[in-house]
Amino acid sequence: MSNYDIAVIGAGPGGYVCALHAAKLGLSVALVDEREALGGTCLNIGCIPSKALLHSSELLTAMQNDAAANGIALAGVPTMDVPLMMARKQGIVDKLSGGISMLCKQAKVRVLQGHATLLGSGKISIAGKDAGEITAKDIVLATGSSPVELPFMPFDGKRVVSSTEALSFEAVPEKLLVIGAGAIGLELGSVWARLGSEVTLLEFLPQIAPTFDADVSKYLQRMLVKQGLSFHLETKVTGCEVKDGNAIVSAEKGGNAITFETDKVLVSVGRRPNTAKLGLEEAGVTLDEKGRVETDAELRTKAAGIWAIGDLVAGPMLAHKAEAEARLVAERIAGRKAPPLNHELIPGVVYTSPEVAGAGLTETQAKARGIEVKVGKAYYAANGRALASDAADGFAKLISDKASERLLGVQIVGQSASELIAEAVAHMEYGGSAEDIALCVHAHPTLSEVLKAAAE
Ligand code: NAI
């Protein structure tokens, strides 16, 4: 069969979720991806493998730092077998990717492997394993994004690398220089620092993790410095040269030139939408000034019958945002009403130790909008569960509108912040106040009581 109700291009968390949801709504679906393994960047070379490495390296650190105080005697100094750690990571990725293939089979989603190009009028050509042409009434573009390269230091996969290679180093580099202290730089910098690399991060802005308030970022930075990572803020990278197998990176900080000699450089300065070689222009799909596919509020592109979701379009480049958009678009194509996504309530998480998570407005953003705010903070150090779990570092911060009491934003730095933020999102989705959180009974002893204490 080569005619479908929907053809989805890209099988990441946007594309495969859209395909499965559309199938559930009774539509016939084709899902096209260049990779054999389904799951896109998130599953194959992003969110999931990084979380696997973060877990392994966190275990090692806990053995090294906390075992003795917990009464655990270890026979020797715990060390990491890097190939085994990588094999565990790949096992998790393969299992999840196989799971998606199975779900597609069960839902009768036709999976096609190859590079898709739009030919106009609902036609798509596929080059690769499943070469040929298909047609669809609606097409959903979900091709994701790729790491941004610095023009003067292109990726060579060995010395100058992206997150893809930094998730698969065969051995612990002696020195790792990270350019950009956002989510990728902080997470992968943490992994390799825990395994023994000397990790230095260079950040262009005056704070790390710049989507969070400065007090949260500063706190996180202090914790990471304690773990051995070093930072140069307000530092502009100006050049890179590879000499005698090492990379020599030059930068500028406060008007002074500095150089760094390192085994590897991880460039993590953001990602850009994958819009090339899709036949977008010919099909009438337009791009905005940032190179993203232009859509209306319901994610329709300028070309009739073509939709776009995830990292390709405006909003944070996050798997859960792509997933949410995927469902909404499938619903709309099936003729149902689905309200636009509120980008402000999409939680952002950095999986360092401690984790940082936020949703809604930061204090800085709220003030910039002229809103008079009330801020509540509570610390992990006063929480019984945190102390019992060797997790006394961190705090929760709630920002509410002074006049209406409505909760505007929440940021948490501390263990399990990634899980705790869900409660904050739910309250904000329902238009709740800090008092609403305070009035909900929270189990004791739990880390969620930190959020409740901040609300009180
Ligand atoms: P990012 O946008 O999160 O951070 C990039 C950082 O690099 C920023 O702090 C920026 O100020 C800095 N920067 C930019 N140009 C620079 C330069 N020339 N020199 C020094 N610093 C520079 O980008 P990142 O970390 O590469 O991640 C890419 C995308 O993937 C983001 O949208 C991120 O949210 C997403 N992601 C999300 C994760 C999560 O949810 N935990 C994990 C990994 C990635």
Image (cartoon, helix red, strand yellow):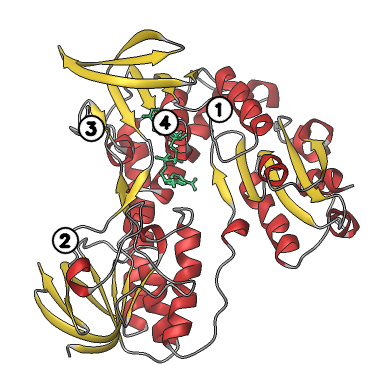
Q: CA distance from mark 1 to mark 4?
A: 11 Å
Residue type indicated by callout 2: Lys
Relative height, residue 66 to residue 413 (above, below): above
Q: Residue at x 9, y 67 (%)?
A: 128
Residue 151 is labelled as 3
Residue at x 43% of width, y 29% of height: 189
Q: In the rendered image, which residue does mark 4 sit on?
A: 180
Direction from residue 274 to residue 73 in the image, left or right = right
Q: Is residue 300 left or right of residue 362?
A: left
Q: Which residue is mark 2?
A: 277
Q: Which residue is mark 1?
A: 207
Disc 3 from disc 1: Cα separation: 24 Å
**Cα–Cα span, label 2 and label 1:** 36 Å
Q: First in sequence: mark 1 or mark 4? A: 4
Kindly identify the residue that appears in the image at 31 percent across and 66 percent down: 11
In this view, 323 is above or below 174: below
Label 4: element kind: loop
Instruction: Give how far across and how far down residue 328 sits, in percent.
Output: 49, 76
